[in-house]
Image (cartoon, rainbow, N blue to C red):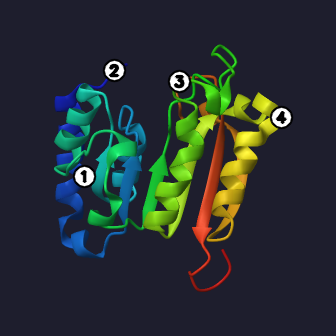
Amino acid sequence: ANITTGETATIYKTSKSKQSKQTNKRPTIAVLATGGCIDTIAAIKVGFKPIWATEICNTRKQMWEDLTDTKCHGDTFTINYSKLKSPDFLSSGQPCPDYSRSGSQTGEYGETGWMFTAQTEIINTLQPKAIRLEISDNTINVHGGREVNQVIEQLQNKYVITKAIIPVWRYGDCTTRNRLFIVGFNRDLEGPA
């Protein structure tokens, strides 16, 4: 079922009123390519405080702003990140048609496939404490997984990285897809990651 902008705002406001006493202590999240804000709703429910996002679709951009009362800055790759606060947690789900089985499978050479690898520059600039990247599980098959390896290589100096293909329907997703997740913890954090 599709959730309207008004419904997402109601969900957020209910969650916000329950957590208002802990607002200043909550870890922060920023999202590159917000999509339908489902991950954002989950993050809010577990206590994250959204601080900003990027998204080019005007409807999705408005959903973010209605849901979080924070700015959605538009195109991920035209933002001056030195002017934005670095979040504790950065989540990203760049477009994956150039990696999916039903897409072009041209990877970084496709119309939007370059975004998957280019996001590492943003992550390395912001240096959040933790990152989560999500994309089609077929990305490991495109060009022999070259782009996945490139992303990991570009992040592993600053982050302890792990990757996994997860059957998302087992965790409440309404699709029967598998998704590739790349998760990283900043090496500057104390203790084992």
Which mark is on residue 144?
4
The answer, for residue 178, to whether it is visible in the render is no
Quick check: 70 left or right of 152?
Answer: left
Residue behind mark 2: 2
Q: CA distance from mark 3 to mark 1?
A: 38 Å
Q: Earlier in the sequence, mark 2 or mark 1?
A: 2
Q: Residues within 10 Å of mark 3 (few under 14, many from 20)?
A: few
Q: Residues within 10 Å of mark 2 (few under 14, many from 20)?
A: few
* Residues under numbered marks 4 and 1 in contact, where contact means CB atoms less than 8 Å apart: no
**Residue pictured at 67% horizontal, 70% vertical:** 157
Which mark is on residue 111?
3
Q: Is residue 136 above or below residue 54?
A: above
Residue behind mark 1: 15
Q: Earlier in the sequence, mark 4 or mark 3?
A: 3
Q: CA distance from mark 2 to mark 4?
A: 36 Å
Q: Quadrant of residue 100?
A: top right
Q: CA distance from mark 3 to mark 2?
A: 27 Å
Q: CA distance from mark 2 to mark 1?
A: 20 Å
Q: Quadrant of the N terminus?
A: top left
Q: Earlier in the sequence, mark 3 or mark 2?
A: 2
Q: Is residue 174 above or below residue 151?
A: above
For the residue pair 166 and 138, the one nearer the viewer reads as 138
**Residue pictured at 37% horizontal, 59% vertical:** 29
Which mark's residue is nearer the viewer, 2 or 4? 4
The answer, for residue 54, to whether it is visible in the render is yes
